Amino acid sequence: MSTVTTTYKVSGMSCGHCEGAVSSEISEIEGVTSVKAVAASGEVAVTSGAELDDEAVRAAVDEAGFELTGRA
């Protein structure tokens, strides 16, 4: 099975709780196998079985209370 890892830029994350909130919401997207959010860099690496819809990722980040600013 092939996987795709995409790194997104997320503004507003400042701590481990923020990382957890973003990771939790993105993890609920169908096909996502892992999420690693790093508050210090504002980057979120998302691994999935196929290319994700950026709007689905944006909605998940919004739900967590942060803003997706684009791909890294």
Image (cartoon, rainbow, N blue to C red):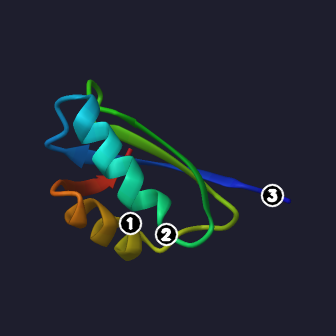
Look at label 1 and name its amino acid.
Answer: Val
Which residue is at the far top? 40
Q: Report the mark closest to the observer, 2 or 3.
A: 2
What is the secondary structure assignment of the residue under circle 2? loop
| CB atoms of marks 2 and 3 within 8 Å | no
What is the secondary structure assignment of the residue under circle 1? helix
Q: Nearer the viewer, residue 18 or 55?
A: 18
Q: Residue at x 23, y 54 (%)?
A: 69
Give the percent coordinates (x, y) of residue 46.
52, 50
Q: Give the CA distance from mark 2 to mark 1.
A: 8 Å
Q: Can you identify the residue that label 2 sits on?
A: 29
Left/right placement of residue 8 relative to residue 5 reads left
Residue 71 appears in the figure = no
Give the percent coordinates (x, y) of residue 19.
31, 38
Q: Residue at x 40, y 48 (%)?
A: 23
Give the percent coordinates (x, y) of residue 55.
35, 75
Which callout, 1 or 3, points at the residue further toward the start of the chain? 3
Q: Can you identify the residue that label 1 sits on?
A: 57
In the drawing, what numbered circle is on residue 19? Answer: none
Left/right placement of residue 21 relative to residue 4 reads left
| CB atoms of marks 2 and 1 within 8 Å | yes
Give the percent coordinates (x, y) of residue 50.
67, 67
Q: Can you identify the residue that label 3 sits on?
A: 2
Q: Is residue 49 above or below residue 44?
A: below
Q: Locate the C terminus by quadrant.
A: top left
Left/right placement of residue 38 relative to residue 48 reads left
